[in-house]
Amino acid sequence: MELDDECEFDSTWEEEYENKTPIKKICRKSRRNRCAAKDMQEFRHSVRNLDDDDDDDEEPGESHFYNLEFYRGRKTSSPDDFHIDKFHKQWKGRYDKLENCHSYIQWLFPIQEPGMNWRAHVLTKKEIKLFRKDEEAKRKLVESYKLMLDFYGIRLVNESSGEVKRANNWEERFKDLNRYSHNNLRITRILKCLGTLGLQHYQAPLVKFFLHETLVNGQLQHVKQSVLDYFMFAVLDKSERRKLVRFAFNHFRPQDQFVWGSGRFRHERHVQTSRVPSCRGHAGSPPKKKKKTEHRFNIKSFICMSGR
């Protein structure tokens, strides 16, 4: 494995990434989605130091903070014309409606990128700052998050830690989640929104849940690629992102086809796994299991020979 097999859009393993020139090298023998890596890098860069950025003289006035006004209950969505509180009450559990309608997700989880609904609005930097300070708006955003988790067969068990688990109806909901690929885009948007609007502690637990379901439990195989290409790298906390990549590597099969992470990281992990005592004996000696097998064979051969 080549040590310089890097992806120029992944800063997960850099200790200092400010003012660094990306390593422009082709990822040979790599199946990693470079468009996805670039997209997630641009997202992570777009939310850096937003609270310290005072360059918002060209930002529109507060009356144009459409997403914040929507979450404050002062504006309805377009074109569906629903109030945020009314949506939470009337749309929860309406799985067919949530599946087939594609205009609400941009209002529930606004980000700095446009979506399919051209009548929704992207977040502005000043709006993000104000939203992060508005506890009531963030509380309602968490309600939207829980509503969508329920739609996917997941439940939030701890709002402080962000821990999530399977809901009682997970089997039914997983079937639809695995069937309709547009939900992968929705979940990526949800993760971006949570990170952008001051709720990033919800990101890693949700991604860990999907990694466990896809790589350990063998569920949601049509979601797995998005989990590895997009979900993992939406996590803003670099230390948490590293833990997720390590977890993914440890459970991905076959490991020699794992391409998420730097070449050096993957090389070091392969070296570590190759040194596990249970897999290889000391100094190239045969594994203990083989020794026992040979020993039993010798005893049987001796008995047979003695019988003759």
Image: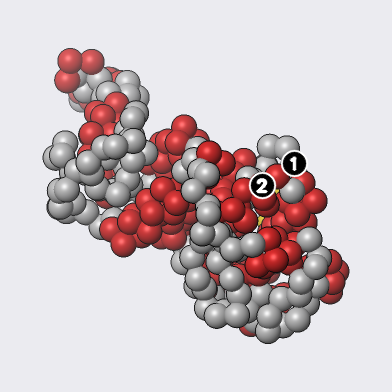
Q: Residues within 10 Å of mark 1 (few under 14, many from 20)?
A: few
Question: Is residue 57 visible from the viewing direction of this image?
Answer: yes
Residue 64, image x, y percentages: 65, 67
Residue 195, image x, y percentages: 56, 48
Q: Residues within 10 Å of mark 2 (few under 14, many from 20)?
A: some
Residue at left offset 15%, top offset 39%: 4
Residue at left offset 32%, top offset 45%: 10
Question: Is residue 88 visible from the viewing direction of this image?
Answer: no
With respect to residue 199, does 18 lie above or below? Answer: above
Q: Which mark, by number, is residue 132?
A: 2
With respect to residue 121, does 217 lie above or below? Answer: above
Q: In what quadrant of the picture does the N terminus appear?
A: top left
Residue 144, image x, y percentages: 73, 61
| Closer-to-camera residue (129/36) | 129
Which tag is nearer the camera, tag 2 or tag 1?
A: 2
Image quadrant of residue 92?
Answer: bottom right
Q: In what quadrant of the picture does the C terminus appear?
A: top left
Three-letter code for the amino acid on which mark 1 is drawn: Asn
Residue at left offset 75%, top offset 54%: 137
Check whether the beta carbons of the residues at disc 2 and disc 1 lie within 8 A of each other: no
Residue 35, image x, y percentages: 31, 62
Q: Is residue 207 rendered to the left or right of residue 82?
A: left
| Closer-to-camera residue (286/240) | 240
Q: CA distance from mark 2 to mark 1?
A: 20 Å
Q: Residue furthest front?
A: 57
Residue at left offset 28%, top offset 58%: 34
Which of marks 1 and 2 precedes in the sequence? 2
Q: Is residue 295 rendered to the left or right of residue 197?
A: left
Three-letter code for the amino acid on which mark 2 is drawn: Arg
Task: Return the residue at label 1.
Answer: 158
| Closer-to-camera residue (186/75) | 75
